Image: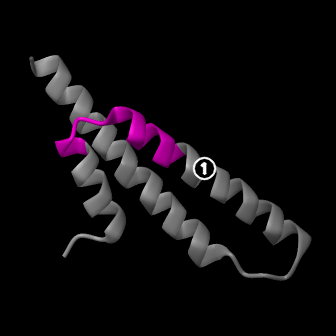
């Protein structure tokens, strides 16, 4: 069963909405920055959240690549 982010990315790919994918990626990257700051400022263990964000960013990147491949095929 696909994860939530994979379902969201799949929907944006079907809608051919690259802008939404890019915004989603930027949002996840901001979350990573915030988690890194939190990690350096406290004893909070953000390793799981950071790993999840990395997986999300990879899934979003795969979606962008799908759009690029379909755009170059046409």
Residue at image coords 39%, 42%: 21
Reply above or below: 12 against 28. above
Reply above or below: 74 against 70. above
Q: Is residue 38 left or right of residue 2?
A: right
* Count of all numbered marks drawn on residues in the image: 1
Residue count near mark 1 (Cα–Cα under 10 Å), binned few <14, some 14–19, many ≥20: some
Q: Position of residue 28 (x, y in %)?
A: 56, 54
Q: Look at the numbered disc 1 and give the secondary structure of its residue.
A: helix
Q: Position of residue 61 (x, y in %)?
A: 38, 43
The single residue placed furthest to the right in the displayed view is: 41
The picture quadrant where one finds residue 40 is bottom right
Query: Is 19 in the magenta?
Result: yes
Q: Which residues are magenta?
A: 13-25
Q: Is residue 57 left or right of residue 60?
A: right
Q: Is residue 17 left or right of residue 28?
A: left
Residue at image coords 26%, 62%: 7
**Quadrant of the image for the C terminus?**
top left
Q: Position of residue 32 (x, y in %)?
A: 65, 58
The single residue placed furthest to the left in the displayed view is: 74
Query: Is 37 in the magenta?
Result: no
Magenta portion: prevailing SS class? helix
**Quadrant of the image for the N terminus?**
bottom left
Residue at image coords 51%, 59%: 54
Reply above or below: 63 against 49. above
Reply above or below: 36 against 18. below
**Residue at mark 1:** 29
Residue at image coords 54%, 68%: 51
């Amino acid at each position: 069963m696909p994860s939530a982010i994979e379902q969201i990315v799949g929907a944006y790919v079907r809608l051919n909405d690259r802008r939404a994918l890019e915004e989603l990626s930027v949002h996840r990257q901001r979350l990573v920055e915030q988690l890194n700051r939190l990690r350096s400022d406290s004893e909070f263990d953000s390793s799981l959240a950071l790993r999840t964000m990395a997986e999300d960013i990879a899934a979003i990147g795969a979606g962008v690549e799908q759009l690029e491949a379909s755009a170059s095929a046409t």
